[in-house]
Amino acid sequence: MPDYSYLKTAALAPRVNVADPAENARVSLEAVRAALRAGVQAVALPQLGLSGYTCGDLFTQTALVEACQSALRWLAEQTAHSAALIAVGLPMQKAGRLYNCAAVLQSGNLLGFVSKRHLTPEERRWFAPGSGGQLFQCDTCIIGISLDDEDLPGAEIVLRLAAEPEEAGLHERRRGLLAARSACLPCGIVYAGAGAGESTTDLVFSGPCLIAENGEILTENRRYEPEDGAVYACLDLELLRGERRKYSFDGAMPSSIPCAPLPPLKEEFITRRYGSTPFVPLSPGLRAERCREVLAMQSAALAKRLEHTGQKQVILGLSGGLDSALALLVAARTADELQWPRENILCITMPGYGTSDFTRETADRLAAAFGAALWEIDIRPACDLHMQDIGHDPDARDAAYENLQARERTQILMDLANQEDALLLGSGNLSELALGWCTYNADHMSMYNPNAGVPKTLVRAVVRHAMDESAPEIAAALARVLETPVSPELLPPDKQGAIAQKTEDILGSYDVHDFYLYYFYRCGFRPEKLFFMAKRAFTGQITPEQLKAWLVIFLRRFFSQQFKRSCLPDGPRVVGVSLSPRGGWHMPSDASAEVWVKEAQEIPLCEGAPEGRGG
């Protein structure tokens, strides 16, 4: 099986019978066996799970302590067939002192004890402070075991044995702290808390089981259940390592206890799923909030630039497509915030050889709906003359034919910006920059680009959100934009006057390319892992053969088109992925893609990449 770098973990909270270690060991074994059957490689059980956390002064009884030791030996024998790492809680006596401990088992062997350092006032009645968390070096990762609310530097995964009595509102704080800690380290945290069966003489325990990874709660159980609690999750070690490489950790690596190799994780047991739009939240509420924030960020950035330059007008090329519609939305919001009349937004529509009647009419409607000024300049006569000047055959529909139109438009916009003392806004998005789907020194260039940090999937989501929240006239114009195929419109329309040049028919789906961009940039995932994840994200929507072909396209174009990103205009980072050479992606323009493309091509049925818009 390929190495996808997952570790399958479990947080278990079996029902406790207070002060009955043999029964607790039996119930714990049932829960552990169920986890092992599901392919789990590392298991966390609650604090003092073999005795029960609420034994009180019974902890001072030799009979209870020795019964816990017998129960631990039995549990080790019963799990000897598995190389999974199992952390179970019990009281342990050493040198006449009692400690709240986690015993770490693997293949029937006791690897060591981890003792709790930070005791509650009640725990100090029975237990001595211990040495705190401990690292265990496995073949695939470093696992930390802890009974304290503490950081374990060096741990990629932390098994956290817990027993916190509940208070109203405590669980939300617990969730927030676990998520925050998993983001700060970064690491995965497997949290198993005491619950069902614990004494309710004075306290209540809810049995919380949660698994967090890099700031996100991946899974959690329903608390206050009368029976066992259990959650499983596949933690992504490659994701965590990619995040950890971005940070510098002070000090030497703490000592660790070596472990035998963990059991391999079969692909059938990998339960991890990925959303198909990592830049766009699936929840309608979160999506709306994200869209509002994106517009606010873009507008704030543009307002600052205008404040700095002192210009009172902006100019933009309005095509009737998604990107220029978003640029218009940002310009309109900025004008309102600066208390400008919207006539200070100068929209230029420039019909060329590929402009359809539909997009031309959409541009008219957009400008009218927003109250912006609209000028029309037909670029075809100038392009005809330019082709004569350079001796280009007008029937040769090659890169020169396409790109001279894009450059003519940019020349017009730049000159008009100078003439009107206006700031020229770019509209190209992050996805186009990643793929190099722009013409060098044409739509690639502007005086400021508020869209530079917004991927195509998020552009579409923001425009749709604006449509839903706008007055009818604006909403109708934006609806036309959303139903228009993505196209640079540089080739003539078909015989019916419809757009003939459709970007996603050439490059592939922007949904897929944005998916690859997110995980390639944010996590540094290798091509094989990207493909594995994409299959799960787009199952039933896009064939594996197509996903593989588009992966090769993405990799080839991402590397070959870096020269365009090396000289980008200013524009704000919006989503945590930036291709700016100043504060985002740093890569030489002549870096080889061979390592990445070769791996992708070795996935069967991958096909080559088209080379359109290369200049």
Image (tube, grey):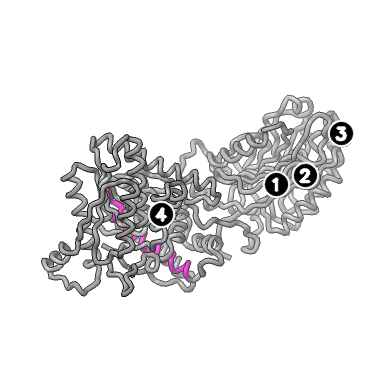
Measured in 3D between alpha carbons, the distance from the residue under mark 4 to the one under mark 1, in whole angstroms, is 45 Å
How far is disc 3 from disc 4 in space, using C-alphas?
Answer: 79 Å
Local crowd size for mark 4, using a 10 Å CA cut-off: few (<14), some (14–19), many (≥20): some
The residue where tag 2 is placed is 225
Give the residues drawn in magenta, as a range.
546-569
Q: Amino acid at mark 3?
A: Thr
The residue under label 3 is 62
Q: Residues within 10 Å of mark 2 (few under 14, many from 20)?
A: some
Q: Position of residue 607 (x, y in %)?
A: 42, 72
- SS of the residue at dot 4? helix
Give the alpha-carbon distance from disc 1 to disc 2, as whole Å.
9 Å
Q: Are marks 1 and 2 in contact (CB under 8 Å)?
A: yes
Q: Earlier in the sequence, mark 3 or mark 2?
A: 3
Q: Judging from the image, what secondary structure is the residue with disc 2 in?
A: loop
Residue under label 4: 476
Residue drawn at (30%, 70%) of the image: 493
Q: Which residue is mark 1?
A: 221
